[in-house]
Amino acid sequence: MAQQQNPYYGTGFYQPSGGYMQPQQQMTPQQQQAMQQQAMQQQTMQQQTAQAQLAVSQGMLPLEQSYIENILRLNKGKPATIVMTYERGSSLGTQSYTGIIEAAGRDHIVISEPKSGKRFLLLMIYLDYVEFPGEITYLPSQPATYAPRP
């Protein structure tokens, strides 16, 4: 039986750029330039990934991860006032906790109160804002230059 030519099966091979290339086919200058640009983009992405992994391994955060828990981790050991508002029906209402930031996770903050020796595990879901009496570290390599509120 003679084999029919199927448009899905050809003599070419698939390229990572998303197209098929026929054997012994010359690339146009535009194709060469597009492949070079794609290779440079991949190299840039690999470098960024490597830098992010290095930063994390050294206890720092990649620049694009400025989430609250990450900012709190960068300011571990600093005094802060954490203001929380609880559910409407709750008798707690709005409360503030002043202490030293011990740890922070995706859904919680741990602070210690040096005077009483108490530690508080606070849930992020109730967090309104955090006040620092001094400068804070916002990015891993530099302190914030914002003046504290009076």
Image (cartoon, rainbow, N blue to C red):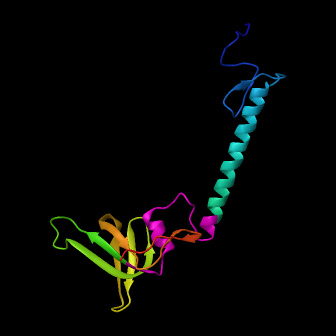
- Along the viewing direction, whichever of 69 and 75 lies nearer the viewer: 75
Residue, x 71% and y 47% (percent of image)?
43
Whether residue 77 is in magenta: the answer is yes
Quick one: which residue is furthest to the bottom in this view?
A: 115
Work out whether 111 lies above or below 59: below
Magenta span: 55-80
| Residue 110 position within the rendered picture, expressed as x and y whole percent measured from the top left | 39, 77
Left or right: where does residue 36 sit relative to residue 135? right
| Residue 117 position within the rendered picture, expressed as x and y whole percent measured from the top left | 36, 90
| Quadrant of res 11 | top right
Residue, x 45% and y 62% (percent of image)?
67
| Residue 148 position within the rendered picture, expressed as x and y whole percent measured from the top left | 41, 75
Left or right: where does residue 145 sit relative to residue 11? left
Work out whether 3 lies above or below 147: above
Looking at the figure, which quarter contains the N terminus?
A: top right
Work out whether 17 lies above or below 99: above
- Along the viewing direction, whichever of 149 and 115 lies nearer the viewer: 149
| Quadrant of res 23 | top right
Whether residue 70 is in magenta: the answer is yes
Count of labels shown? 0
| Residue 66 position within the rendered picture, expressed as x and y whole percent measured from the top left | 49, 61
| Quadrant of res 97 | bottom left
Residue, x 78% and y 22% (percent of image)?
22
Residue, x 15% and y 66% (percent of image)?
89
Looking at the figure, which quarter contains the C terminus?
A: bottom left
Quick one: which residue is furthest to the top in this view?
A: 2
